[in-house]
């Protein structure tokens, strides 16, 4: 009778359950009770022959508890698996999102760089020199109304690092643009240095001797027209700040270091010339 009452009570509880989780908990408890009544209760009756209802109650309680423990363990496994799968789905979606963003960014950069390369071939020397100023890691100070700067800004090839005043700012090329400009610049420097190295010219030999760090003489005399004839054959390595009486000769930006590497010696920053 105790056994029958216990099952009736369990079914009554099950019928009152309103959620899936509780239904599953009830189901595991029923299984626990059924197994306990089938296997444990007969053993208890051997030890408690005069307490049938007590053995049934103990079997019922033990089975219910065992069923609840099984439910709790299964629930934890289910929730862990659910959260793990959810996390994996979220990570996969995040990877896809980042991948798509990177792909879109790469396409924009590729298109922007392609447009810049096409434009770069049509720039004059002054415009290229202005652009090269913006390849440094700290950028460069320029007026906001600079023509080349406006063209670069219109095409989103530069960004303003900081504003110095209403008319000036620190500007810098975007990394992928700067990389291309520096590559072209390096190629140009290498070509000019190689051409200068091969050049046979009396003024070239004189300048190399005067520019040498160990040389104590840093000025020389030269005839005006032969000077310009000889320098016309020079690739773009030196900056000539001269008039009809003379002046100074300096290295173009980055050429001093390149020439020192080529000739394996140190050079001074400038020398002076007097025209006769």
Image: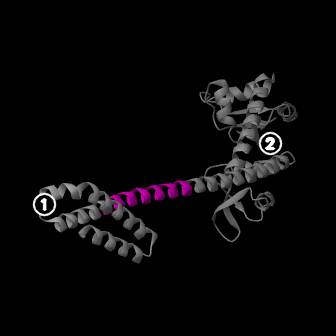
Instruction: Locate residue 181 relative to residue 122 in the image: left or right.
Output: left
Nearest the viewer among 225 and 122 is 122
Residue 124 lies in magenta, yes or no?
no
Residue at 28 percent of width and 70 percent of height:
6
Q: Which of the colour schemes (rainbow, by chain, secondary structure, one colour) is used?
A: one colour
Residue 175 vs 196, above or below: the answer is below
Number of residue marks: 2
Instruction: Locate residue 19 relative to residue 228 in the image: left or right.
Output: left
When asked about the image quadrant of residue 166, the answer is bottom right
Residue 202, x across and y down, in percent: 79, 24
Nearest the viewer among 231 and 139 is 139
Nearest the viewer among 271 and 54 is 54
Element at badge 2?
A: loop
Residue 217 vs 116, above or below: the answer is above
Find the magenta span and give its range: 68-90
Q: Which residue is mark 2?
A: 245
Residue 200, x across and y down, in percent: 81, 22
Magenta: main secondary structure equals helix
Residue at 13 percent of width and 60 percent of height:
49
Residue 109, x across and y down, in percent: 73, 51
């Amino acid at each position: 009778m105790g056994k029958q009452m216990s099952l009736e009570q369990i079914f009554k509880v099950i019928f009152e359950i309103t959620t899936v989780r509780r239904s599953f908990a009830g189901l595991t408890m029923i299984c626990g009770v059924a197994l306990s009544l089938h296997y444990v209760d007969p053993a208890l009756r051997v030890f408690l022959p005069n307490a049938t209802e007590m053995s049934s109650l103990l079997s019922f309680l033990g089975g219910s508890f065992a069923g609840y423990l099984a439910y709790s363990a299964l629930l934890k496994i289910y929730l862990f698996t659910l959260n793990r799968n959810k996390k994996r789905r979220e990570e996969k979606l995040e990877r896809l999102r980042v991948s798509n963003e990177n792909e879109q960014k790469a396409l924009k950069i590729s298109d922007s760089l392609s447009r810049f390369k096409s434009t770069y071939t049509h720039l004059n020397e002054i415009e290229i020199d202005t652009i090269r100023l913006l390849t440094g890691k700290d950028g460069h100070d320029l007026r906001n109304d600079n023509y080349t700067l406006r063209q670069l800004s219109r095409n989103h090839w530069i960004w303003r690092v900081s504003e110095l005043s209403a008319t000036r700012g620190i500007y810098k090329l975007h990394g992928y643009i700067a990389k291309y400009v520096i590559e072209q610049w390096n190629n140009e420097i290498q070509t000019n240095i190689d051409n200068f190295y091969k050049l046979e010219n009396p003024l070239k030999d004189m300048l190399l001797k005067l520019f040498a760090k160990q040389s104590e003489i840093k000025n020389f005399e030269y005839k005006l027209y032969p000077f310009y004839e000889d320098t016309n054959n020079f690739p773009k390595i030196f900056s000539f700040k001269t008039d009809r009486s003379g002046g100074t000769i300096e290295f173009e930006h980055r050429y001093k270091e390149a020439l020192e590497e080529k000739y394996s010696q140190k050079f001074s920053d400038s020398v002076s010339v007097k025209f006769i």
